[in-house]
Amino acid sequence: MYNIKFVEEHIQELKETSIKKGISLEFDYFIELNEERKSLKGRVDELHWIRNEKGKKVGELKRRGEDPTELIDELEDLKEGLTQLEQELKEIQKKVNDFIAWIPNLIHPSVRDESIVVREPTGIRDFSFKPLTHIELGESLGILDFEAASRIAGSNFVLYKGKGAVLERALVNFMLDLHIKRHQYTEIFPPFLANEESMFSTGQLPKLRDDMYITERDGFFLNPTAEVPLTNILAGSILSPGDLPIKYCGYTACFRREAGSYGKETRGLLRVHQFNKVELVNFVLPDESYRVLEDLLDEALDVIKLLELPYRVIQLPFDDLSFASAKTYDIEIYAPGVDKWLEVSSVSNFEDFQAKRAEIRVRIGGETKPLHTLNASGVATARLMVSLIENYQTEEGEIEIPEPLLPYINFEKIG
RNA sequence: GGAGAGGUGACCGAGCGGUUUAAGGUGCACGAUUGGAAAUCGUGUUUCCGCAUAUAGUGGAACGAGGGUUCGAAUCCCUCCCUCUCCGCCA
């Protein structure tokens, strides 16, 4: 989390950032609180000092076998006022911390008030017939069953069946293998549940509490992205420059409540409560993070390029940036059936924001400082599946399997 | 779920109510020595907060987390978390 002095010294900048990211925070209230905190802290420190000095004398007297009763009486009087002030300081400190927890990460200067197309749309196909939607294809081919999923769990869940289930599993394996072999990642299979502290470290909390599933008895959070477990692997660590970069890649199911988003956009697989995703997380030296951001974009794009799906890349405007991100590219792939561009990957540089919260540091010379973290989806399957089946459909309503997936699948088409 | 042992600085490890200003070691940084290195010697080496004559000053806080007892807690008590050993349950 931000150090309080840093907040004091960058208050204007942080205020502007919060406004740009659409988080309304009362900085005037904070300034007032902080003044109060400082003055209280001064008084408490002074009383502690007096207590410590006199306390030492009590020890001396006792060792010499003299009577410390008088001093002890004085200290008892001191204690009364002190306890109250300590309590007040503690409360105000908590308020200050709660405020700081809501301040989002600073925004990189290259980020604008509108989105920028970083890679022009490529690879859109010409169909000689009207392409069907994944919902129509999925149901007619019996590979997606939304009704069964809602019977089991509820609306906006999906069940993959038969060749659909095989295809989903193949996609995950294909992506993992790609990143491990071609991009030198270490594969991780993490817990799908995480504790509150982990959620705070990566910046899901405090803002996204309502978007997450929480287990009732133990207060665990179902992870909304593998970014959370993968980043927290190194929480509390101090690394040396030679350890870096560290590249972790992992598959998890991702769980999102998607509170408040209903309607047309949520039809089919476009927005579901549980989806599969392969995630890439990098830990790097601060100087290198913006170069690595470009590398990560290319690594994620490799999945799309190998599957020969139409894509474009957008640099997000500042009001679309997540709480923790300084700069983000979105990879979108085109789905001709629903006629939409679908976000399948966010590629973000968090600079030292998460590293500060998770206390992931690097020791350079004698100095210990937070490193930089980045992540990219590599990529999310639900929407990847949509684009894939809509792009690879034939006029006969069948789906061809792209060549790179054939090693993972024992059939060449679904139909 | 039950019983026991433990959690101390970057790491190991002592301390078990007031000479802790957290011993000692390792590592690290800087310096000396060297043709250069190793070894050796010397100095330094946590974080956060307050005040200030504001890089060298001064005071406070932090020994898994949170409470409590006490004039005073790393040290005693309670709750919780985590690690290890054993038992139970279980895919």
Image: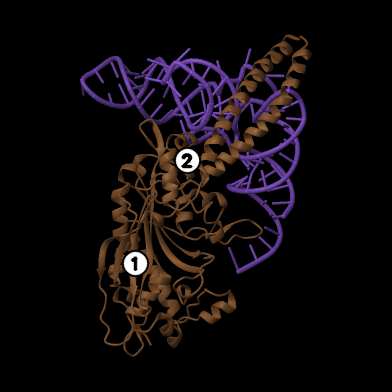
**Is residue A14 in view from this perspective?**
yes
Return the residue at label 2.
Answer: A2
1 or 2: tag closer to the N-terminus: 2
Chain A as rendered: colour: brown
Does residue A322 appear left or right of residue A80 in this picture? Answer: left
Tags 1 and 2 on a common chain: yes
- Binning the other alpha carbons within 10 Å of mark 1 as few (below 14), some (14 to 19) or many (20 upward) gives many
The amino acid on which the numbered mark 1 sits, given as a three-letter code, is Glu
Residue A346 screen position, x and y as percent: 38, 60
Q: Is residue A18 above or below residue A264?
A: above
The amino acid on which the numbered mark 2 sits, given as a three-letter code, is Tyr
Does residue A372 appear left or right of residue A91 in this picture? Answer: left
Of A114 and B10, nearer the camera is A114
Please report, as a chain letter, where disc 2 is located. A
Q: Is residue B83 above or below residue A30?
A: below
Q: Is residue A79 above or below residue A227?
A: above
Q: Is residue B32 above or below residue A270?
A: above
Return the residue at label 1.
Answer: A332
Residue beneath the point at 38% across and 78% down: A338
Q: Hey, which residue is sitting farthest front in the picture?
A: A28
Quadrant placement of the C terminus of chain A: bottom left
Residue A68 screen position, x and y as percent: 76, 13
Label 2's element? loop
Please report, as a chain letter, where disc 1 is located. A
Chain B as rendered: colour: purple
